[in-house]
Amino acid sequence: MAEEIRRHRGTNDEHPPIGADPYTEFHEFDLPAYVGIPTFQKLPLVTDAAALLERRPDVAIIGAPLDDAVSHRPGARFGPRAIRQASYHAGSVNSLQVEIQPFSWLDVIDAGDAPIVPSNLPRAHDVIRRKVTEAAASGAVPIVLGGDHSITFPSASAVASAIAPRRLGIVHFDAHADTANTTWGVLNSHGTPMRRLLESGAVEGRNFVQVGLRGYWPPPETVEWMREHGLRWHLMTEIEARGAEAVVADAIAEALDGPEAIYLSIDIDVIDPGMAPGTGTPEPGGMLTRELLRAIRQIVTAVDLVGMDVVEVAPAYDVSDVTAAAAHRCVMEAVSALAAKRRASGAAPRGRAAAHPEPSGG
Ligand SMILES: [Mn+2]
């Protein structure tokens, strides 16, 4: 039996051994998903700004565990942790959709969480802005795991500053417009970040494009403000009539009508709550998970993606982790599409070769 195992080992192994001692036989990257400390997809943890600058990763995953700004059910502060562990794969993955092993082509790291404390919203936004700024300064595409949607104001602002003088367009998937002036008098809630982004000049109204809006909010005065400021949006009813792919193609063209680069903001509640119940303000009648994942591939393939967030995952309301898994896959689709673009550009791979993971501590 031992001989039988030996003959099979070493050829076509998904998780190649790096030693003979069972204790150190596998690199932690190749151990099962549930073993070890869950950084995103078992990627190296690089939290320090100087280390980021030296390493210059292609993508930096950042947690923004904040839900002090919600208007209804809280719990999104636990989103980053839930998304990080919403994978049943060891580190190496092979995207069948994109036909690529993304971590063989891109250096992707987990930059850890912004150092948030509860009940201090201005401080939380400040540290998120700094964390995203540090990641962007290293040349990485920051991908931020929320957290409630208020985090998009500091996150997208940081990216807009980092790419200046290039201009930013934003594609925003959500059931909700998040364009209120205030919610009960509060300027920086999860219902207002998009108005703050416009007012601050991070993005022009005409290049702020929303997809998936539906339901019963905001009120007519806010919709009128959106029209006055040139925002463009695509209701769920338009997706029903035209199909998501055609609508997303329009959204890309509108967001890039002037700007050169795109920030992608995904509120997981754009997905129908039947498929993604783990969120604070579920609105029936949303996109299919598969439509959203396809849309992310479509967008990242077509544009220069300079930042992204996936927000509003509230694990306490989730069922069997399906919402966290959808959010995790939103990130994976973007990373896979970025990797495919590097391959198509003729540039050399710079990730870890799938069969030769970097040594421990690397
Ligand atoms: Mn929403």
Image (cartoon, helix red, strand yellow):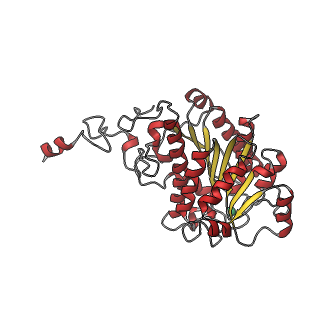
Looking at the image, residue 312 sits to the left or right of residue 190; the answer is left
Q: Nearer the viewer, residue 343 or 154?
A: 343
**Can you give x and y, in whole percent of width and height, for residue 60 in the image?**
58, 40
On the question of residue 147 being in view, the answer is no
Where 349 falls versus 78 (above or below)? Answer: above
On the question of residue 176 being in view, the answer is yes
For ligand 1, give the image quadrant.
bottom right
- Looking at the image, which residue sits at the far top? 54
Residue at position x 65%, y 36% from top?
A: 136
Where 159 falls versus 120 (above or below)? Answer: above
**Can you give x and y, in whole percent of width and height, for residue 162 in the image?**
71, 36
**Total tally of numbered discs in the picture:** 0
Which quarter of the picture shows residue 168?
top right
Which quarter of the figure is the C terminus placed in? Answer: top left
Which quarter of the picture shows residue 31?
top left
**Can you give x and y, in whole percent of width and height, for residue 90 in the image?**
40, 48
Residue at position x 50%, y 41% from top?
A: 340
Q: Nearer the viewer, residue 175 or 262?
A: 262
**Can you give x and y, in whole percent of width and height, for residue 226 in the image?**
82, 59
Residue at position x 31%, y 37% from top?
A: 24
